Image (cartoon, rainbow, N blue to C red):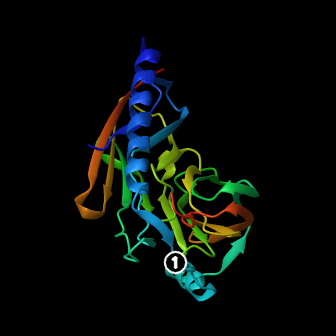
């Protein structure tokens, strides 16, 4: 359902610092807005993002309602080995989506 | 070939995201004013730093000083650090003064990060101060604050 867009360089030299960008589609409803009838629109946000490299957690973030809709994140990582990045977003009402990207490290 | 592929997924994604935004916007008419208090902000900061002193410096918060649309404000936090196993940034915490909640986001790094820098897009409900605090591996805390003027606040739009 939800779709994610990941940007990881396909190749890097060993020891390079690479930028990873991750974007996912999500309304990030704050839980502070009300309808015309005055009812609170229930909160529906992504609460956590995790990035694992070859199974080991390397970066994590907690999100709050102050993160804009369709949350975007950019962070950095040292390219030590070839392998696979796995990304996971978890949120309210059992929301969960994943994505992955591979990198090959050359000497 | 690769580029074309990227373009296609990007277009797909934007269509999807736009759809979600429209669907979400229809029933919403207005928002009641809720604001975090200075006490809530200092409580949220105490939650992270405990009793440790927070020093000014090392942290850089890049955020436009004047924002037209508070619904999506680009923000980059970077910390001066060698990011070595002995001396690195463990986490970065971002707070605001006047949104309904004082927290914006927490970001957990490691020596593998190579560079202590994180970017995201945030919501700002009002003209206010944004604070970023970095937790270093030696246990110290460093902070910086930036004042942001918001002309169109997040969540206060009238009938659509």
For the view shown, which residue lies furthest in the left direction?
Answer: A94
Tell me the crowding category of disc 1: few under 14, some 14 to 19, or many 20 or more residues within 10 angstroms, Cα based.
Answer: few
Question: Along the line of sight, which residue is nearer the eye, B115 or A86?
Answer: A86
Q: Residue under mark 1: which chain is it in?
A: B
Residue occupying image coordinates x 30% and y 44%: A2
Q: Which residue is mark 1?
A: B32
- Judge left or right: residue A79 versus residue A37: right
In the rendered view, tell whether residue A29 sits above or below residue A36.
Answer: above
Secondary structure at numbered mark 1: loop
Residue occupying image coordinates x 51% and y 72%: B31
For the view shown, which residue lies furthest in the top direction?
Answer: B1
In the rendered view, tell whether residue B37 sits above or below residue B154.
Answer: below
Question: Along the line of sight, which residue is nearer the eye, A34 or A100?
Answer: A34
Q: Quadrant of the N terminus of chain A?
A: top left
In the rendered view, tell whether residue A51 sits above or below residue A94.
Answer: above
- Judge left or right: residue A15 versus residue A3: right
Asked if residue B73 shows in the view, the reply is yes
Percent x, y of residue A22: 45, 42
Asked if residue A84 shows in the view, the reply is no
Percent x, y of residue B130: 66, 67
Percent x, y of residue B159: 52, 62
- Judge left or right: residue B83 versus residue B18: right
């Amino acid at each position: 359902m939800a779709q994610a867009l990941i940007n990881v360089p396909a190749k890097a030299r060993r020891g390079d610092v690479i930028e990873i960008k991750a974007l996912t589609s999500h309304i990030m409803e704050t839980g502070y807005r009300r309808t015309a009838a005055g009812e609170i629109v229930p909160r529906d946000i992504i609460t956590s993002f995790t990035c694992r490299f070859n199974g080991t957690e390397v970066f994590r973030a907690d999100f709050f309602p102050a993160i804009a809709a369709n949350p975007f994140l950019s962070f950095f990582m040292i390219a030590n080995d070839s392998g696979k990045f796995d990304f996971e977003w978890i949120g309210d009402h059992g929301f969960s989506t994943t994505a992955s990207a591979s990198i090959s490290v050359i000497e | 070939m690769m580029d074309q592929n990227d373009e296609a997924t990007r277009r797909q994604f934007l269509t999807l995201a736009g759809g979600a935004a429209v669907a979400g916007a229809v029933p919403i008419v207005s928002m009641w004013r809720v604001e975090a208090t200075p006490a809530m902000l200092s409580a949220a900061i105490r939650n992270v730093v405990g009793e440790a002193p927070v020093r000014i410096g090392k942290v850089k918060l890049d955020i436009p000083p004047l924002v037209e649309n508070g619904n999506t404000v680009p923000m980059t936090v970077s910390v001066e650090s060698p990011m070595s196993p002995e001396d690195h940034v463990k986490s970065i915490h971002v707070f605001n003064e006047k949104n309904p909640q004082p927290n914006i986001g927490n970001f957990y790094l490691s020596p593998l990060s190579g560079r202590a820098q994180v970017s995201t897009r945030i919501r700002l409900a009002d003209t206010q101060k944004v604070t970023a605090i970095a937790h270093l591996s030696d246990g110290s805390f460093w902070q910086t604050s930036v004042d942001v003027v918001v002309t169109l606040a997040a969540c206060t739009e009238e009938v659509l």
